[in-house]
Image (cartoon, rainbow, N blue to C red):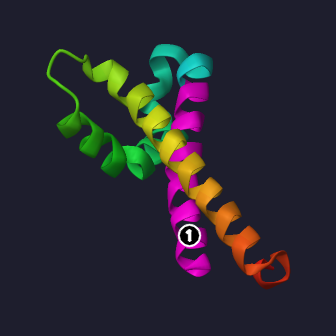
Amino acid sequence: MLTFLTLLQLLLFIPLLALLGQGLLYVLAGPRRETNVFYQLLRLLSKPFTLVMRKLTPRQVADRHVPFATFFMLLVVYAVVTFERIDLCVRIGIEQCR
């Protein structure tokens, strides 16, 4: 179970960092971000999660807000997984969690 939670935490951390990097490049590169190779790579990494969030959100939510919603949804799920991992480590003993 610990391995599963650790793997899930890693799988959530990658798109979280990709969305954070996208936001940073959005601010730094401005309108030229679409031609930035790193921005396109980060967008590719977070695209599966953004597409799922687009399907979950109503049509009234603008497409430009979906990455924000995806980031906060992933952040909440990451926090839940982290708390579950901590709880598991407390139950089985800290020595076995290393």
Which region is colored magenta?
A: 1-25
What residue is at 58 percent from the left and 35 percent from the top?
20
Q: Position of residue 57 (x, y in %)?
A: 22, 29
From the top left corner, tell me how far across and down residue 12 is, in percent. Answer: 51, 55
Pointer 1 local density, CA inside 10 Å: few below 14, some 14–19, many at least 20: some
Residue situated in front as seen by the camera: 79 or 60: 79
Name the residue furthest left.
59
In the picture, measured across the screen, residue 72 lies left or right of residue 29, that is: left
Residue at 32% from the left image edge and 51% from the top image edge: 48
User: Which residue is denoted by mark 1 in the rendering?
Assistant: 5
In the rendered image, the vertical position of residue 29 relative to residue 78, given as above or below: above
Residue 76 location (% of width, % of height): 51, 40
Image side of residue 28 versus residue 50, left or right? right
Which quadrant of the figure contains the N terminus? bottom right
Asked if the magenta segment contains residue 23, the reply would be: yes
Per the image, label 1 sits on a secondary structure element best described as helix
Residue type at mark 1 is Leu
- Residue 47 lies, in percent from the top left, at 34, 46
Task: Please name whichever residue, 22 or 59, is drawn nearer the observer in this view of the structure.
Answer: 59
Whether residue 44 sits left or right of residue 42 in the image: it is left
Q: Is residue 51 above or below residue 67?
A: below
Asked if the magenta segment contains residue 62, the reply would be: no
Residue at screen point 44% across, 51% down: 45
Between residue 61 and residue 40, name the one nearer to us: 61
| Up/down of 30 relative to 91, above or below | above
Placement of 36 over or under 96, stated as above or below: above
Residue 40 appears anywhere in the view: yes
